[in-house]
Amino acid sequence: MSSLRNTITPERLIRQEILALNAYHVPPSTGMIKLDAMETPYLLPESLRAQLAQLVAGAEINRYPDAGAHSLKERIRQVTALPSGMDVLLGNGSDEIIQLLAMAVAKPDAVLLSVEPSFVMYKMIAAFTGMSYVGVQLSEDFSLDLPAMLVAIEQHQPALVFLAYPNNPTGNLFDADAIKQIIEASPGLVVVDEAYYAFASDSFLPLLDEYENLLVMRTFSKLGMAGLRLGFLAGSKIWLEQLEKLRLPYNVGVLSQLVAETLLANHDVLLQQAEQIKQDRAWLYERLVGTVDVHAYPSEANFVLFRVGQATKVFEGLKQRGVLIKNLNGGHPALIDCLRVTVGTPGQNEAFVVALQDTINHLA
Ligand code: PMP
């Protein structure tokens, strides 16, 4: 018996593609100025927090949540001005929705296609669900390489295409006409991932009824609700009713539904915070552009990507000075010497710029 037990090892039992993965890494951040994860730096106004406290006190957490989350979905319809005839599916963060989509189409040899560099979970979730992954390189300026995309779509016939709009970690919006051509050329679903919609100047949501294979995904994580875990997929009922079968019945809890609904009833407060962040992004970008040895990329999101000599040393120097950002150096080849900073409060941005300059001076 015991010799048999010894042969039960993860290497023998777990799928090879899972053994080969590295878990998504979340670094410790206690006591630091946290500019690594695209969170909103602002708490809610005191009056709204008091209102939420009262609602939470009265919440029936002894009961399972409304499995259909009807009133929350209705609120989402209103604040997003969803085109009529379109439906909404809720996820425990949009990560979960990526997983639902992949599970639904993961026939043997099915392909998930995206661009690189982009959001790493597309590739990871392809591995989780046994899909083949194809990553088409972006051009040097991080724009879409449309000819390469069209060739890859023709060659691999992807069941799912993910395009982050704006893209993470590069921050840019791709050319909308190029995306339309990709949607038209795709034999499967194209998901435009608008995680950063609140900071961007364009959206595909109004185009949902023009393309039968288009879905638009959004999250509220970047709009002050990262801790709630709430994302949604918008699109035609013919797709969403299939995905609903895979959604675990109570994936969005009582408290998340209640709080999100209340916050969306105060959407203007959240959008004001987003407006402030957009202004501060412009300030931060200008400061980065003006820093010797730094190349900053324009952004339509709540972060700025920049390239700097000795990026890992700069990242470590910032950490020693109490500022945590994201080190992308050593990941994708197109991101050599790249770092990504989330826009914080004006004070945090200032502290970051000072710490960056100090670090660069010390390394010179
Ligand atoms: N899509 C993109 C492009 C992202 O950058 C992120 C988060 N970094 C997500 C989706 C997932 O967000 P969440 O699971 O918090 O909704």
Image (cartoon, rainbow, N blue to C red):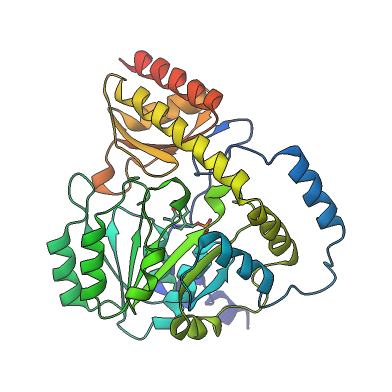
**Whether residue 35 can be seen here:** no
Q: In the image, residue 82 lies at what x, y percent?
A: 49, 67
| Vertical placement of residue 79 versus 181, above or below | above
In this rendering, position of residue 64 left or right of residue 337: right
Q: Residue at x 68, y 77 (%)?
A: 67
**Whether residue 54 can be seen here:** yes
Q: Residue at x 26, y 71 (%)?
A: 183
In this rendering, position of residue 150 left or right of residue 162: left
Count of marks, rendered view? 0
Where does the C terminus fall, quadrant-wise? top left
In this rendering, position of residue 314 left or right of residue 94: left
Observer-nearest of 147 and 125:
147
Q: In the image, residue 42 lies at what x, y percent?
A: 62, 37
Where does the N terminus fall, quadrant-wise? bottom right
Splitting the image into 4 quarters, where does residue 102 fall?
A: bottom left
Splitting the image into 4 quarters, where does residue 340 fall?
A: top left
Q: In the image, residue 226 lies at what x, y percent?
A: 59, 51
Observer-nearest of 335 and 69:
69
In this rendering, position of residue 338 left or right of residue 56: left
Q: Residue at x 52, y 35 (%)?
A: 276
Q: Residue at x 35, y 45 (%)?
A: 171
| Vertical placement of residue 234 versus 240, above or below | above
| Vertical placement of residue 238 versus 27, above or below | below
Splitting the image into 4 quarters, where does residue 65 fall?
A: bottom right
Observer-nearest of 127 and 176:
176
